[in-house]
Every structure is written in C-alpha cells, then in structure tokens.
Image: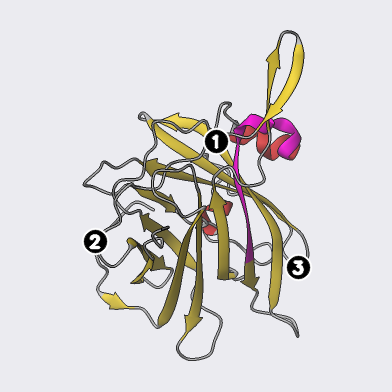
Amino acid sequence: MGASARIGLLGALLASLAALAGPVGPVLASERVTLHASFSPDRPGVSTTIGFGFEIHDSNGLPPTPLRSVSLHLPPGIGYLTTTLGLATCEPAALIAHGLAGCSPNSRLGFGSAFVEVPFGSSRGYEIPEIQALMGPPHDGNIVVLFYANGREPVYAQIVFEGELITGSPTLGGRLDAVVPLIPSVPDGPAVSIVRVHTTIGPSHLTYYEQVHGKTVSFHPRGVTVPVHCPRGGFRFSARFGFQDGSDTVARTSVPCPRRHR
C-alpha cells in the first residue's frame, strides 16, 4: 500500500472483491453482513468470472460503522494456472495520476460498483457506478488486485485500493486480503459508510490486445477455472469484515453445484 490516503481508499470498496485474516475481535458487531458469490459460467472445469458482493446493515437502523478490513476466503480447487488475466501490470501512481488511461487494457481484471452513505445531507445514499479491477505489481510473489473508482459528489476522491490474492490448492482455498482506510466525507469530516459493493474478477466483458504479424488483434482472456468436483453443499465462500469500532463479523455463502446435463 502507498502512503497516500487515496491509495488504499478503494480498499474500502472491494472490498469488492478484499483482507488479511486477523484474530476475532472482542467486540460483537452491531452490523449484519449479507455475502453474495457467483461463477459465470458455472460449469466444472471451465474458465469463469467470479462475482463477489456484500451488503452491510446496522441493527439499529443507522448508517453502518465504517468498514476497516475485509478478508474473502475462496473455495478450494479453483484453478489459477491456465488464466491469462492480467497480462500487463498497472502502477498505482500511474492510475492515480492518469486514471485508466495510465494503464494497459491488458491489466484489467473486472468491474464493479458500490453504494456509500455520508453522515450529512437530506439524502445519505450515493452510488459509485463503476469500479475497475486491475492487475497491480506483485507482492512477495502474490497477485495484487487494484480497485479503482472516481468518487464524485458529495465525496470527491480518486479511490484506489490494493487487495492481495493468496492462491490456494485443490484442498485449501485461497483468499483475497485487503485493509480498508477511513474515507473522509469532507476534509477533516466524519468517514463515509460503505453499504453495498459488487465486483467481478474474470474475463466477462473484457477485451485484451496483442500484436500479431504487425497488426493489433483483440481477444478475450481466460479466467480462473471452476473446480471439477463440487463438494456437498456447493462451493463455499466466507468473509470476515472488521469495523472502525473494533468489532467484526463473519458472513458466509455458497455457489450451488451446477446441474448435471443429461
């Protein structure tokens, strides 16, 4: 993570798709989190796009406590070896300075959106309609995912977050780790609350480019592969969410086993 407050701002958003698993906090969260996950297509052994999302609800009906970390645990057996996602890397500084124009299209990994609440105004909810996921420089041999968005009114900021992907094995699931900085609603003001996030990692709607015999040719990258064998109960995902007040909570979901085709 860079020292800039903006670098890491998007860590808040992925969440989408983001966390270093920490010890269970001593405080039970008043927030309830609903976790969503999907494979598209959902067929054993094929290239897929992973969808990940969550919604945070405060049990007292107030804006949720600001999110500080997310740790997404993936099901075992996801195949990383044949993916061609992230043929180029994007530098966080270039992303902040120039936006998406500062990075190669071949560094894009997926898309998403988010919904945040600010603690002022007559309408507290605001949509961030587009988040981009890009391949960042690796860290200790692990894949780094950058999530980028342009926050407009009422919160104006370039949002960039780094999530580190720890790959798994046939028996041990991987995880996507992110630390979420506080996002000020206004300079020196209270932090915004992240309410809803959805993001994808995979080839859906992505186009890459390569040079073939001196000509630029477009193609669609391959994603990670769905495990060949589906365990009883489906492919299980879980995520731990840590909040500003020191509380945390765990949410779980699963992608059902695909139907067998006769």
- Residue ID for mark 1: 135
Toward which corner of the image does residue 113 lie, by quadrant?
bottom right
Q: Which residues are magenta?
A: 100-114
Q: Of helix, strand and loop, which one carries label 3?
A: loop
Instruction: Locate residue 23, reporting x and y percent.
Output: 24, 61
Q: Position of 147 compared to 165: left or right?
A: right
> Which residue type does callout 3 highlight?
Pro
Pick the front one: 60 or 89:
89
Where 104 sits versus 74, above or below?
above
Asked if the stretch drawn in magenta spans residue 234, the answer is no
Q: Of helix, strand and loop, which one carries label 2?
A: loop
Mark toward the viewer: 1 or 2: 1
- Residue ID for mark 3: 154
Circle nearer the N terminus (1, 2) = 2
Q: CA distance from mark 2 to mark 3?
A: 35 Å
The residue drawn where x is 27% and y is 69% is 25
Looking at the rendering, in which quadrant would you find the C terminus? bottom left
Instruction: Locate residue 43, reporting x and y percent.
Output: 44, 52
Crowdedness near tag 3: few (<14), some (14–19) or many (≥20) residues, C-alpha within 10 Å: some
